[in-house]
Amino acid sequence: MREAKLNISRRKFLVSAGVSGAGLSLGLTLPVPGRAEPAAAEEVNAWVVVQPDDTVIIRIARSEMGQGTLTGLAQMVAEELECDWSKVTWEYPTPGESLARDRVWGSFATGGSRGIRGSHQYVREGGAAARMMLIEAAAMQWRVPPAECSAENSVIIHAASGRTTTYGKVATAAARLVPPTEIPLKDPKDWKLIGQPAKRLDTREKLTGEQLYGSDLNLPGMLNAAIKACPVFGGTVAGFDADKVNDMPGVKGVLQVDDNAVAVVADTWWRAKSALDVLPIQWDEGPNAKVSQADIEAAVKEGLTADSAFVGNSAGDVKAALAGAKTRVEATYSYPFLNHATMEPMNATALWTKESCEAWVPTQNGEGALAATAEAADLPLEQCEVHKMLLGGGFGRRGGGDYVRQAVLIARQMPGVPVKLLWSREEDMKHGFYHPITMARMEGGLDDDGNLIALNMRISGQSILAGRMPQALQDGKDPIVFQALSPDGDHAISYKIPNLLVDHAMRNSHVPPGFWRGVNVNQNAVYMECFVDEMAHAAGVDPLTFRQRLMQDNPKGLAVLNAAAEGAGWGKPTPDGVYRGLATCYAFGSHVAACAEVSVDDGGKLKMHRIVAATDPGYAVNPQQIEAQVEGSFVYGLSALLYEKCTVKDGAIEQENFDTFPSMRVAEMPEVETIVMPSGGFWGGVGEPTIAVAAPAVLNAIFAATGKRIRDVPLRGQNLRSA
């Protein structure tokens, strides 16, 4: 492992007098693990640090986990800053520093496709304010009005006299100025960097291996910990025999962590893991040990016909409209538990003393990790700090603080020594926060002309908010259950259906639910888009035409659907044996659609040839990154469609590794063509809305190829041969 050059003590700040708020001027540098310390630099404001050679360091509060958020955010700052992109680099501020500065960097949480759309305004203002301060500093030196000066490519220009200077030369003077309070932003038509496929800022380090992830971290004198929790959720430790492993090579301690886990600390992780594997542990598995997968599924199924449910969207009189419909169609769909299965298992490193606690964490929520650190350390927030590491995959899993808490609790029992906790793959698989299990009962009615006049959609299953954030429930209802089905907002239903009822029978289990990439849009898009396809075929109407009828009041969504269909050649001949399927939805503030082309041979083997995807996120900060996000989300979503499912036996998750929870292979991945069509005027998400349309588009194409409706996923083990 590579050793990071880190300052383990609390960082010291040199505060300049007379400056406050968002422009607090600090003479500081923030080291990033694994990267060389920058040259002497000057903080112009909280977002922008300038070195004498004109290198610009942009502070990024959101987390980077492969999706390109840090590059997109840096582009927005740099756009308003008018700096030389070739000299831009980045660093993470810490949540402790943000707390000390009155949360100057805003939210550190990265999830829900909010990295850019949730902070675009204030990060652009940060870049614009820094530009204004740099220009003012130059104007003061030249004794000219700032309005006569302009900036471009890190050069400040006074056109009247022909004088120029660079950001690096005036940064010190700019840092002493009072930040502006009125900060005009560019008109989008004047953007030069936003909207361009700018190079990613983290590519070189990843290609060379210089980039440190949490699992790479190696601090001086560091010990390593492996952990094992009770396999049944809700169970506890009844006892363990530390004497059996205390004398094994490298073992430094055998520790109980909370009431449900045991850890072994050793000089290397492998020695800790080897000792843990042979450590005799007795578990009190509790009543949940009697729970089976069949029990959970039966409870969810019961909810499909229960009298009571939370209403998420309603219009008209569904019951009467269904009773009067010429044609009625009914179907039941299901979606399973899923693990996040990040490539890098959960890990965190902590150093605890009676006076302070520091943690190095790959986290999607730096402030949440700081809170978990302080709580486990039993210290005030002001005496704790979290250093964010790049994530080897997040997908919602690293928004939780469970692994951070464990690391700190272990470090408390080894005071003054940094300890890195690394979960095994098996621990990661069996102790996650899982995509919620749900089912949906769909009832639809058509009139004499084949129009969809009524839809009754009953969702039954888990609530993520009930399990993770019960304080966010609204009179007991979980509003995010209805993502892509809501009457309005960032998750509004794409279709106008005159008589509609969408409700949710909450049926929670002992398996903890979590925010899995795309959250509830994954199953809701399958339920809605596959059933709309069923209704189209029952009506004898082309699936594209059927959807177009329902989207006349949704012009942006309709444009995206039409673009995906046209891009795939909908209505035109396909190669022999190849069939198409459509899907669309509106989620996380973006319109998305996909058209899949598949074939199914006589033996029932599926081949996905191509998916054409279209998205309108309002503004496209970096089109190349959007294309990569679409492709990556399809890998994740299609892996779930094809193979992935977690099941419960004797209260515990059965799947322990990738042999029983496999992902797609490279040869199985279809060609993906992405149409990025930003219409402007709003900021939508990218990483999560697109994942939802791949699976239903493929399922609808399978029906077109075989005449079979697949209503339960994954496809693994199901017979896809033609009906």
Image (cartoon, rainbow, N blue to C red):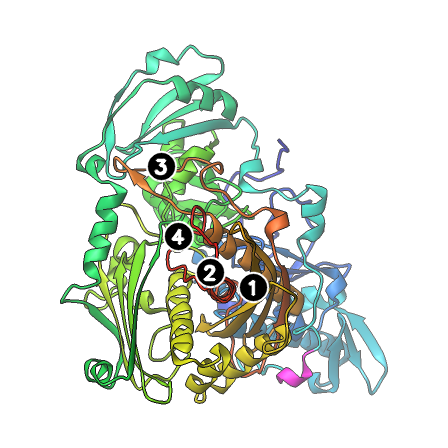
Q: Is residue 99 left or right of residue 135?
A: left
Mark 1, other Cα within 10 Å: few <14 / some 14–19 / many ≥20: many
**Tag 3's secondary structure?**
loop
Residue 397 drawn above or below residue 704 = above
Q: Amino acid at mark 2?
A: Arg
Residue 368 marker: 4
Residue 190 shown in magenta? yes
* Residue mark closest to the camera, 3 vs 1: 3
Residue 618, position as x, y percentages in the image: 55, 78
Image-based side of 137 in relation to 550, left or right: right
Residue count near mark 3 (Cα–Cα under 10 Å), binned few <14, some 14–19, many ≥20 = some
What is the C-alpha distance between the residues marked 4 and 3?
30 Å
Amino acid on which disc 4 is placed:
Gly
Image quarter in which the C terminus is found? bottom left
Q: Badge 4, how many Cα within 10 Å: few under 14, some, many 20+?
A: some
The label number, if any, that marks residue 101 in the structure image? 2
Q: Which residue is mark 3?
A: 654
x and y percentages locating residue 590 in the rendered image: 49, 74
Which of the two labelled residues, at mark 2 and mark 4, occupies the earlier sequence position? Answer: 2
Image vertical order of residue 713 relative to residue 75, above or below = above
Q: Position of residue 437 (x, y in %)?
A: 32, 53
Q: Earlier in the sequence, mark 4 or mark 3?
A: 4
Identify residue type, mark 3. Answer: Glu
Q: Nearer the viewer, mark 2 or mark 4?
A: 4
Q: Which residues are magenta?
A: 187-191
> Residue at position x 58%, y 36% from top?
216
